[in-house]
Amino acid sequence: MPSLDEITRTTGTPLANALAAGLGDISYGQTVRFTRYQRTVLPVDGFVFWVSTGETQDVQGAIHVTTGNELTEDQAYDQSSIVLTTKTEVHPFHDLALDTIWIGDFEGVRFAISSRSSRYSQAGLFHYLGSTVTPAFQSQFIDSASMLQKMEPVTSSSLALFLALPMLGSVALDWCPWPSGVPVFPSFAVPDNQPPPYVAVHNAPDGGRAVSMGTLDPRRILHWALLNDDRLGIINSPHIRDEKQASAEINALAMSKTIELDVMYSQTALRDTALQLIRHVTPTLTRSS
């Protein structure tokens, strides 16, 4: 006796046939183009980029988009959830190598498939879930690997020092070499299903503290404050921090950095500056002939 899956794939159940007809009616033969990207890790600090392979695949089905506005203290963007329903199973979505991902493009919105949901054999439909590639991650999808050849370290923390531990040699450490076959990864960037043992290094964004001024400090702001000491003063040693904004769909961190300034200011100078801004934008009325 054939199994339920075999019946659904060959003749189809009455429910599957009805739903397939309905899917065809609402999709109008719609197709979504997907492009395959290859995972590339920047060797200097383990940062993850995705490079286009040029391989594409058109998937026929109905796509449902739910969009919401996200607002934080430093970002404002649209975040969309994607549901792609197809009549046939799309094997590349779940038969991928660990270093490959397919990115869809729908009306200019790029998204990644993260899972398959609500699989009911009698229905004969497949539902794939994903979410959009947010602005913070757009720059990590590139068209050519040549763009990475001159890339400097992305991270500003001590991460690179820890990632280099398995390769650093020292006569003083000959008695205690790094264990063979134990890789080191940045936190939130451990490859899918990585077998232990391995080391994950996490640099907390608020864990760093500057003890002196460095060459990478925000000198433009510091110089402005020094030349306008009657308005604004900076009372800390600001340093660049790597934020941990992660995306599970692409298994990567965003190139997100912050600088925190502790300032003191004169309220009189603040009021005078505000009045100057108001006068600067005061409209003028002219009479037309």
Image (tube, rainbow, N blue to C red):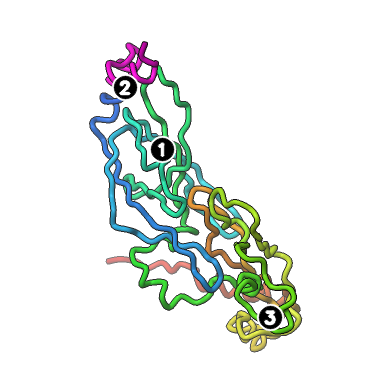
Q: Is residue 266 visible?
A: no
- Look at discs 2 and 1 and give the one toward the viewer: 2
Q: Is residue 164 above or below residue 31?
A: below
Furthest toward the front, the residue is 175
Bin the neighbour count of mark 3 within 10 Å (Cα to Cα): few under 14, some 14-19, many 20 and up.
some
Could you tell me how far apart the alpha carbons at marks 3 and 1 are, in whole angstroms? 48 Å
Contact? badges 3 and 2 (CB < 8 Å): no
Q: Read off the residue under disc 1.
A: 65
Where is residue 93? Give x, y as percent. 40, 41
Residue visible at 56% across and 64% down in the picture: 256
Q: Position of residue 214 (x, y in %)?
A: 66, 84
Q: Secondary structure at mark 2?
A: helix
**Cα–Cα gap, marks 3 and 2:** 74 Å
- Residue at 63 percent of width and 62 percent of height: 182
Residue at which label 2 appears:
9
Kindly identify which residue carries mark 3: 231
State the predominant SS element of the stretch in magenta: helix
Of labels 3 and 2, earlier in sequence is 2
Q: Position of residue 87 (x, y in %)?
A: 32, 28
**Which amino acid type is marked by label 1?**
Val
Amino acid type of the residue tagged 3 in the rendering: Arg
